[in-house]
Image (spheres, rainbow, N blue to C red):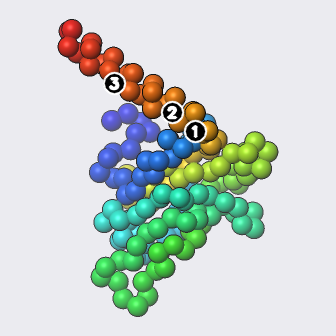
Amino acid sequence: MAKGEISPDRIAAQNRKARHNYFIEETMEAGLMLLGTEVKSLRAGQANLNDAYAAEQNGELWLLNSHIPEYRHGNRNNHEPKRPRKLLLKAREVAKILGAISREGMTAVPLMIYFNPRGMAKVQLGLAKGKKQHDKRETIKQRDWNREKQRTLRAKG
């Protein structure tokens, strides 16, 4: 596996619609402040990142609208499923993201939550611009054409 690639068995949640709805300009890794029951629920692979985004509150970045369900074997101290979670980034990275969001009209979209080799939960954030409907159709058309091209090359080869 190449450096920077994430093993599929370490991925806790993916936002598959993000690459369909947005042009991803740049990606970066951020840490997550989680509670113990959230980590256990993530390890069980039960998170949902659809409709999730990162936003600024008091000069810090927070992951909003992400759903990590309550841990099944938790007690009354279980976590709230849709609570805001603080993203852990260096000050320079936070300034870069906040500048892109405010100046260039971009959005910070979580692409996946995964566990790094040390076992820490990380979020892959993408700085993204929204796609228009015709851009989405063009992407689908291009993907279908590439698939058809591969089929014909395989049949002739």
Q: Quadrant of the N terminus?
A: top left
Locate the C terminus and report the quarter of the image it occupies.
top left
The part of the image, by quadrant, that contains residue 28 is top right
Q: Dot 2 corresponds to which residue?
A: 137
Amino acid type indicated by mark 2:
Arg
Residue furthest toward the right? 103
Q: Which residue is mark 1?
A: 133
Q: Is residue 74 left or right of residue 33?
A: left
Which element type, helix, strand or loop, lies under badge 2? helix
Look at the numbered discs 1 and 2 and tell me whether their residues touch, using CB distance below 8 Å: yes
x and y percent of residue 37 in the render?
Answer: 40, 76
Circles 2 and 3: CB atoms closer than 8 Å: no
**Residue underneath mark 3:** 147
SS state under label 1? helix
Q: Name the residue at 36% across, 70% down.
A: 41
Disc with the residue nearer the chain's start (2 vs 3): 2
Q: Residue 146 is drawn in which quadrant?
A: top left
Horizontal placement of 147 versus 111: left or right?
Answer: left
Measured as percent of width and height from the top left, residue 58 is found at 75, 67
> Marks 2/3: CA distance?
15 Å
Q: Compute the Cα span from label 1 to label 2.
A: 6 Å
**What is the x, y in percent for residue 3?**
42, 36
Depth check, front residue: 107 or 79: 107
> What amino acid is found at the position of numbered circle 1 in the picture?
Gln
Q: Nearer the viewer, mark 1 or mark 3?
A: 1
Q: CA distance from mark 1 to mark 3?
A: 21 Å
Q: Is residue 115 above or below residue 151?
A: below
